[in-house]
Each structure stands twice: as structure tokens, then as C-alpha cells.
Amino acid sequence: MELPELQVAVLEAADTQAHRPVPEIADETGHEPEAVAGAAFALEAEGLVTVTEQTSEQLGLTDEGRRYAESGLPETRLYRTARDTGEDPLLGEVLDAAGLDGEAVDIALANFARKGYGDIDSGRVHVDPDATPGDDPEAAALDALAADADPDGPVDRLVERGLVERSTETTRVVRLTDDGVTALMEGVEATERVGQVTPELLTSGEWREVEFAEYNVAAEADDVRAGRKHPLRRMADRVKDVLVGMGFQEMQGPAVDADFWINDCLFMPQDHPARTHWDRFALAAPAEIDDLPADLVDRVETAHREGVGPDGEGYHSPWDEEFARQLALRGHTTSLTTRHLAGEALGDLEPPQRFFSVEKAYRNDELDATHLLEFYQIEGWVMAEELSVRDLMGTFTEFYRQFGITDLSFKPTYNPYTEPSFELFGRHPETGEQIEIGNSGLFRPEMLDPLGVEADVMAWGLALERLLMLATGAEDIRDVHGTLVDLEYLRTEEVTY
Ligand code: PHE
């Protein structure tokens, strides 16, 4: 029989009686364990060997265990030092002399008592002269493990003390079958097979003559876990693609911004409850922006104080520039929209315009199944001469349809800066519940006027995490984003739409 060289080596190394571990054969034949496993599987397919898995228990010292193996168990050090210091010495002195402090003190005292090494009375250590810490089975087992020998002592106790850790190890073992024996007796020869096409083989034309090894693509192999994009990041990329496809341009802007851009330009009165320190993450240093565009500040201030238009529509609320200059993490990405509409980001923009961003916003919310303290908003706006609620609904219908979400509902709501305003809901595919996925509306003239915008503007903020939940069926936002996310989910989740 002819077999590839490595298979011959593995066949010859295999035994009918002993199960030989793959790593051992690898050592012996000087090949990589993966290659040996591959050869063993090929031989198994021919019925010449069997390959099985064996699990064995390993015992290993923890860092603490290793320290004690070197310097002695704390209770032994306490005993020996006390014994050598004289008659009933003071505990504090013994501890100092034994170099025991912190946690080690409690450990020493507890085990000193448990092992009957003596007692401590009125702050003095009285050792039992007949105690024999030198014969302590725990110390013996610890020493054995440190020397890589089999411990025959109270291993469980050492595990409980956190000095030893158990782990299991799985190894593949190979055993020769009867057919394997027959093959070896009849004689097995190594074929020269080429495992890899090289440039030399190709240029020399030698590839015509050689025999190529067959690949067993069905053989088990180690999982290779390469880096991969987080499902939420992939959803963000997808959202960007969809919006660019719908004719939108991406906005850029700072995550830390002045309250002016985050709130004042949105006609949010400075005494609005959402502007209290409860909701925002304020910056300590620097606490405020140096300068704001003076003209714009004047117009915004007038709108807040006196209202807008011939009737002076508005809240007529007090306004303070100092307050507007305060810096905070943006509570929504609508700050990018105000920067763009006011001409601060890209200069004056003429209608029609479509802009979006998929960026983080930060809110001092209560963390729960549907709220995170930092989350991604899909911000967007359209500026045109004539816009209505139909345009808004049509845009959402079109956008969400690309993610397979077709049963949207709209609920009238209130925003200080839009009129009319709509909350957007989508049906959760698993629970059937209507969950809120966004907020939107047509910007009020009281907001647009001071920014110098004459056309209509419709705008929205949608939650990226909620979109991912609807698209994947996840029921808890913490299952898709954050520190509690299951690694297996990150390794395998596909973002499909
Ligand atoms: N800023 C709003 C939010 O964070 C969303 C929104 C943006 C609403 C623009 C209307 C217009 O919920």
C-alpha cells in the first residue's frame, strides 16, 4: 500500500494496545500536531486507525499557591516564627517577623487554629510544641504539584483554599486497528506527494509530474477566530449604505459640544426639564466653549426671549449666553443638524439638501432592557421648498423597508422644536410588542428662522440599537451591545436584512 509520508509515520507510531496522544506522535515524528491530526483522520477514513478524544483532569497551582510553595504556607510560617521567638510571644511581633501582612494574616490565623498548631490568647501566641507542620499533608501536596509530581494529599482542600485549580484537557488519541496491522505487515510505502503548489513547481513545469496530496476538507480542525466587525457596527455600515443610496450626505461633528448647538439652536428653553444636570453629562474641563458666532447668538437669544414672527410666537423664556456656552456630551446628534442648518459646518446650504449621521449620543438614563447610557442615533434631515408629513412618512417607509420592517406606526408627540411631531414604532418580531424606534417632525419656524433657513426642513433621530433589535429579534439591548454581550453571539451573529 502507498500512503503519504506523514501518514506512514503516524501509522508506524500507532499501537494496537496503547492509545497514543496526537501531541506525543507529533513530538516523535517531528511534525506539527495539526498535521499529525490531519494524517490520523485520513488513516481513520481508510479504517487503519481509530481517533478518539480523551479528557483528563489537570491540576495547576494558582499564583497564590505558587507563592506558598516557595515561601511556605502562612500558618507554617506563623508557627515556626512563634516557636523560634521564645515563650508566648506577642502576635504582632510574630507576624512582623514572619513577614505576614494583609490578607495573609487572616489566612495564617484561620489555618493555624484549624490545624491545631496552638492558640492565641490576649494577643500572645502559644504554640503546641508537639505540632508537626513539617508533616503537613497540604504542604506536601503543594510541593508535589510545584515539582510537577502527582500529589497524593488533600487536593480538594487546596482547591477550596484557592491554591490549586482544576482544569480539563482534551487530547485526541490514535490506536491501530486490525486492518492497520495487516497493512503494516503487507508493507506500506511512502508516496512523494506534494502538499502545496509553489512558484518553482509552476515555472519548472515539474507540477506536471508530481502527485498532489488530497485535502480532506471534511476533517475536523481547530476553530480559527479572526477579528470581525461587531454586529452593531455592521448595522451602522448598512444604514449608511442605505441612506447614501437614498441620496443623503453624511454629517460630521463633535461628540462634546456647547449647549448652544445641542439645545439653544433647537429652540429648547433653558429652563426645559431635559436641560437640567440630571440628564446631561457635563464636562468639567474645559467647562465651556470660548466663542460662539455672535450674530447667530443674537438671533437665537431674541427668538427665545421675544419669539419669532409678527405675532412673536414662542416661549418668551429667559436666556443666558453663559449657559449656552457650557460643554456636555451631546444628548442627541441633532447638534450636528443645527451646526449644518446654521451654516456653521459647511457654509450656507441651498435647498434641496439631504443629510444624515450615525453617531453616538449620551444620556443619563436608567440602564434597562431598552435603554443604554450611550447609544447610536441615526440622525437625518431633508431641506426642500415644500415638505409635508407625507414626505416624512414616505421616507421612513422606504428606509425601514430595506431592513424588512414594514409595519411602522406613527404616534403624534410633542417636541419643542418640531410641529407636527411623530414618534415612530415598529413591531418586535419575537414579542409582537410595539417598540419605539425614533422621533421626528417638521422643524418649527421659531427654530429655523434664527438659523437663517427659509425652506421647510423635516428631521428625525432613530435608534440604531432598536433597529438591530427589530432586525435580529434580540429582546434586550444589553444582548447586542455592551459588556454583557455573549462572545458566541459576537462570533457568529450575521446582520441580515
Ligand atoms: N432629537 C430627537 C431625539 O433625540 C430626535 C429628533 C430629531 C426629533 C429631529 C425631531 C427632529 O429624540
Image (tube, helix red, strand yellow):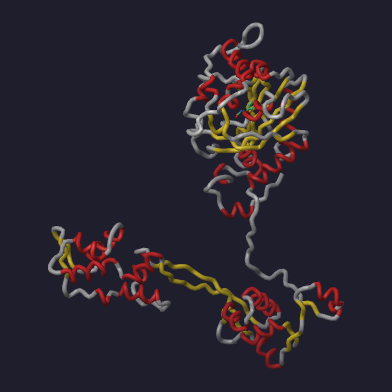
Residue drawn at x 64%, y 82% as measured from the top left: 49
Q: Position of residue 471 (x, y in %)?
A: 66, 42
Q: Nearer the viewer, residue 360 or 49?
A: 360
Q: Quadrant of the N terminus?
A: bottom right
Q: Nearer the viewer, residue 328 or 399?
A: 328
Residue drawn at x 25%, y 62% as measured from the top left: 110
Q: Position of residue 361 (x, y in %)?
A: 58, 35
Among the 4 quarters of the image, the one containing residue 32: bottom right
Q: Quadrant of ligand 1?
A: top right
- Number of labelled discs? 0
Among the 4 quarters of the image, the one containing residue 348: top right
Quick check: can you spot residue 139? yes
Among the 4 quarters of the image, the one containing residue 249: top right
Q: Nearer the viewer, residue 365 or 492?
A: 365
Quick check: can you spot residue 414? no
Q: Quadrant of the C terminus?
A: top right
Q: Is residue 250 above or below residue 157?
A: above
Q: Position of residue 102 (x, y in %)?
A: 30, 57
Direction top: furthest residue: 311
